[in-house]
Each structure stands twice: as structure tokens, then as C-alpha cells.
Amino acid sequence: MPDTELQERIWAALAAHPVYMVSLVTEGDIRTRPMSGHLDRDHHRLLFITHRHTGIIGAALRSPSVGVAISHEDRNFYTAISCSASEVPDRETLRQVWTPMASAWFPNGPHDPDATLLALTPTSAEIWDGPSSSVLVAFKLATAKILGRTPALGVNATIDMR
């Protein structure tokens, strides 16, 4: 399967469920947290509203790579995405992606001086995309066992996301 088709599957999955697990290296440890993201396909990035003065921005900018993971168990679809990080100081972009949920953390809205955008630009990804039917999975496992083969349970590939 061509990388472009797999890239589109990943972007579609990101659009379908906009809360991702974001992993950063902080003080030598991997820290993972759920974050609500906004797709910016025009600039090939994910945007996250965050506090300027928390460790998230600093840790992301110091990391050579930031991880984003999504899991759609009902579809048997999983992906781990490596991203480069940058801060987007543009207030207009912040206003465009602002949500009512963000107001819970920033009562002054998108004009809050502590509100900023973390941009994660995907560079590579590993994808696992298999059949969503548990009956089909069971059939493929049984068939592979009977035939003495490795089961063919879908796509597993590492792709360039640039």
C-alpha cells in the first residue's frame, strides 16, 4: 500500500477522534498525557492550546521528537506518530482554533497572555490497521494455524509523514 494512502488513513483517524496521547521526554522520563488537538492540514501539523508557562512547551521544544498516539480499538486501528515541535505565537491562529473547553483553563479567552499553541508536525508514523471484525480475526488466526503460516491481520508499516 502506498505511503500516501496510509498517510490519508492516519489524517482521517486524527480528524475522527481529536484527543490524542502526547508523549514528551521530561527530566529523562517519558511523560504521556491526553491532549485535545486541532488539525491544520494546510500547514501539515496538529495544534494544541496550552499554557506558555508550563513545562509542556519547553519540554516539547527541547525534545528531538514528540510522540502522538491514537487507538481506535473498535476498528482495530493504531498509530504512533513521531513529530517535531514548535510554538506558534500567532494570536489569529489561536483565535481560529479556540474552543469553549479551552476557556476553562484560560478565562480571558484567546487573548490570555499565557495561552499559546504547540504545533506538532508529523515526520514519521508506524501504523497497524487490521480487520475490525473479531469473527474475521478469529478465522484468519485459525486458518494460519492450520496452514502453519503467520496470520495476515492487516497492515503494519512505518512511513514517512512529510
Image (tube, rainbow, N blue to C red):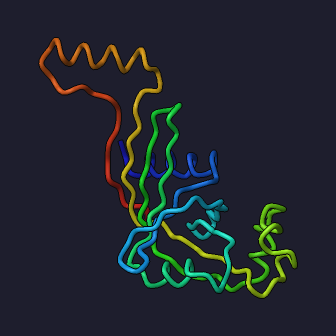
Q: Position of residue 74 (x, y in %)?
A: 53, 31
Q: Residue furthest right?
A: 108
Residue ID at (67%, 74%): 50
Q: Position of residue 107 (x, y in %)?
A: 86, 75
Classify residue 49 as left or right of residue 45: right
Quadrant in the picture for residue 80: bottom left
Residue ID at (38%, 42%): 128
Please name whichever residue, 17 or 43, is drawn nearer the observer in this view of the structure: 17
Tell me: residue 73, above or below residue 158.
above
Q: Position of residue 15 (x, y in %)?
A: 63, 50
Residue ID at (56%, 55%): 20
- Please give the count of numbered marks on the rendered protein: 0
Tell me: residue 143, above or below residue 70.
above
Quadrant location, the N terminus: top left
Classify residue 108 as left or right of residue 129: right
Q: Position of residue 27 (x, y in %)?
A: 40, 80
Quadrant in the picture for residue 138: top left
Residue ID at (44%, 51%): 4
Quadrant location, the C terminus: bottom left
Classify residue 16 as left or right of residue 66: right
Q: Residue furthest left?
A: 148
